[in-house]
């Protein structure tokens, strides 16, 4: 595996989830494949809850990539299918955390994601 800048961000964010937020390794999937509109797509990081539901989707960008609305649109498209409770977009330097509001079809920005319970 080649350590691209995006992969560096992914690996460090996974370590943050495990070490700081206490998410179990067994609930974290990397590059999970799915099909959206007959196209194969992959989530960078997908975290499941205790009963196997999608809990958090993480979209990783390289540090040199500015996080734009396009990154949020990408993760939102994934979430139309996955229905995760939280969305995260990070380039390793800047992180955006969102909690889904499915009733109002929007998301609420958070300062941090919750620790694993």
Image (spheres, rainbow, N blue to C red):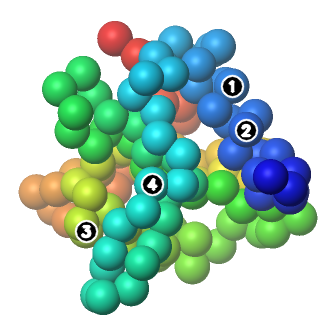
Q: Earlier in the sequence, mark 3 or mark 1?
A: 1
> Which is more N-terminal, label 4 or label 1?
1
In the rendered image, the vertical position of residue 47 relative to residue 58, given as above or below: above
C-alpha separation, residue under disc 1 versus residue under disc 4: 18 Å
Q: Residue at x 44, y 45 (%)?
A: 46
* Residue 81 on image: x %, y %: 24, 66
Q: Earlier in the sequence, mark 4 or mark 2?
A: 2
Residue 85 is situated, as x and y percent measured from the top left of the image, at 28, 43
Residue at image mark 3: 80
Q: Is residue 91 left or right of residue 86?
A: right
Tell me if 31 is positioned left or right of 39 in this view.
right
Q: Quadrant of residue 115?
A: top left
Q: Nearer the viewer, mark 1 or mark 4?
A: 4
Q: Which of pointers 2 and 3 indicates the residue nearer the eye?
A: 2
Label placed on residue 32: 4
Q: Is residue 94 visible?
A: no
């Amino acid at each position: 595996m080649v350590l691209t800048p995006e992969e560096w961000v992914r690996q460090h964010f996974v370590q943050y989830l495990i070490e700081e937020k206490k998410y179990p390794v067994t609930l974290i999937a990397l590059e999970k494949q799915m099909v959206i509109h007959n196209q194969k797509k992959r989530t960078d990081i997908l975290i499941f809850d205790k009963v196997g539901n999608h809990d958090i989707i993480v979209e990783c960008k390289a540090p040199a990539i500015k996080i734009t609305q396009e990154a949020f649109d990408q993760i939102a498209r994934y979430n139309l299918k996955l229905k995760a409770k939280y969305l995260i977009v990070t380039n390793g330097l800047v992180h955006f955390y969102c909690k889904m509001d499915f009733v109002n079809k929007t998301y609420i920005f958070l300062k941090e994601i919750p620790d694993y319970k």
